[in-house]
Image (tube, rainbow, N blue to C red):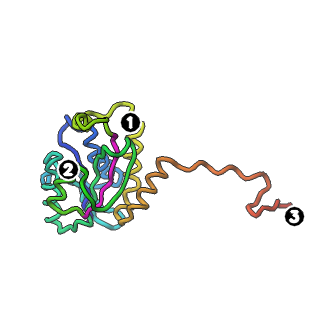
Amino acid sequence: MRLLIGLGNPGAKYAKTRHNIGFMAVDEIVRRHGFGPWRARFQGQCAEGTIDGEKVLALKPETFMNNSGRAAGEAARFFKIETADVVVLHDDIDLAAGKIRFKVGGGHAGHNGLRDIDAHIGNGYARVRLGVGHPGTAEEVHDHVLNEFSKADMDWLAPLIDAVAEAFPLLVTGDGQKFITKVALILNPPPPKPPRPDGANGSGKDTKDT
């Protein structure tokens, strides 16, 4: 079983804030891949589904961001899920808005949600970092992540969330690099190939009537 965790804060007050981009991504994954209904469990909201034969438990902690590890730890212990089988989707102010990165393990870079998860299950889990941009100064960070996305942000936010959900099965199989590559191709598809000249048959020679 895989444990998919989206980070954010519970309640309508925070639903559209930058800190909740992890919740948004998990919501779309659950919707697109036909998971079961959300229900209260493990100090959060959970939904279960199956992707490519692998069971996946989606979790949105309701402990508020700074205590995300409490919910993550409860779910992981109950199902005996190894840290290596956990994927966390979260906001990242060190990435430009709309950018995405994937990594396994490493530090929390000051992100309080990741810091608390590290304390409860260790840091060897996979992270999908969803860029929300930096406000410019450290003093502005708190307000920046707790402010709602603007209308202009929707131009990159909606396509990013859709691409993450579409490519998510590649994370279930453990291929983070293919996941990132597919997201990039969805967001920036290659230009169409120019049409072949009339009479070309793909061999470099003209066809002839017989």
- In depth, the one of 75 and 133 nearer the eye is 133
Residue type, mark 2 in image = Gly
- Screen quadrant of the N terminus: bottom left
Residue type, mark 1 in image = Met
The mark nearer the N terminus, 1 or 2, is 2
- In depth, the one of 54 and 21 nearer the eye is 21
Q: Which residue is mark 3?
A: 210
Secondary structure beneath dot 2 equals helix
Q: CA distance from mark 2 to mark 3?
A: 71 Å
Residue 197: image location, x then y, percent: 76, 52
Q: Is residue 57 above or below residue 133?
A: below
Residue 11: image location, x then y, percent: 18, 39
Residue type, mark 3 in image = Thr
Magenta extent: 124-133
The mark nearer the N terminus, 2 or 3, is 2
Nearer the camera: disc 2 or disc 3: 2
- Which residue is painted at 64% across and 51% down in the image? 193
